[in-house]
Image: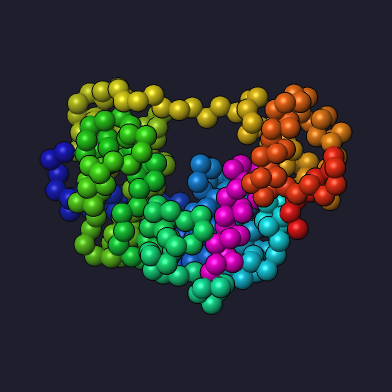
Amino acid sequence: MDASPSALHDAVLEWYDDHARDLPWRGLSATPWSVMVSEFMLQQTPVARVLPVHATWLERWPTPAALAGDSTGEAVRMWGRLGYPRRALRLHAAATAIVERHEGEVPASYDDLLALPGVGDYTASAIASFAFGQRHVVLDTNVRRVLVRAVSGQEFPAPAVTRAERDVATGLLPDDEATAATWAVATMELGALVCTARQPSCDACPLASDCTWRGAGFPAYDGPPRRGQAWAGTDRQCRGRILALAREADSVSAEQVEAAWPGAEQRERCLTGLVADGLLTQITPGRWALPG
């Protein structure tokens, strides 16, 4: 890539000004709690599926204290079909910690965010950047794909963030805090809407003329195998069906679980796992419910 960092910034930020989606966790009216809830929900889940759940979640629990004052079972129930429901438990735990440590206000400090349950480097950086306008490297899947294509000339990034990848991202981060925060969300939006995994719209990309991957003729990915998202017949599907039963009733019986999933060994394994993960409670032999 021959363009200077400032030229890349101008191109991407100008594109973002014209193409940014109007999402409830963006803009001046979005609270830090709204941003935090969105970051938990958007992990491995498309925006379209998150939007209605985010809205109902914020209506019921507009603050961390409101969520912390309710049961973990209600958090799991309201999580609905977003998938990976342990995220609901982690968000509840984070809300509880916010009440205990930060007087109910989402902390602005990266270190304080990172110390919350269920918050890793990416989530702490994203909240600090998007909610508080701070300067942090924010490396989600979309940002990583944009940068590895534009700068490194590869179709996809490595399975996990590498030191070289983080160095590239750090080197491209604008010095000004507000500009850096906008750059983070703009590159994320570019990856989500234009520089997509399967069908990138290179003709619509503001970096097309400077993209190393495009300039090299779109060389195919030759790294470690990329894992697919299998669903049918998996433990994830089995767990999802059992949780769906529990969300819709006060409790669920062994007969109901058996009717929902016929494979006895897998069914028992998933029931045991759901209880161990705190997503279900066995209230009597052969009957389970969401935690109280």
Residue farthest toward the bottom in the current orientation of the protein = 103
- The quarter of the picture where the C terminus appears is bottom right
Return the residue nearer the eye: 64 or 15: 64
Q: Is residue 151 above or below residue 89?
A: above
- x and y, in percent, of residue 291 in the image: 74, 54
- The quarter of the picture where the N terminus appears is top left
Return the residue nearer the eye: 231 or 267: 267
Q: Is residue 83 visible?
A: yes
Magenta stretch contains residue 83: yes
Residue for point 85% across, 47% down: 284
Answer left or right for 114 relative to 244: left
Residue for point 84% across, 36% down: 254
Residue for point 63% across, 34% down: 236
Q: Is residue 207 visible?
A: no
Residue farthest toward the front in the current orientation of the protein = 285
Q: Quadrant of residue 111?
A: bottom left
Residue for point 58% across, 60% down: 93
Residue numbers of the magenta segment: 78-98
- x and y, in percent, of residue 173 in the image: 24, 55
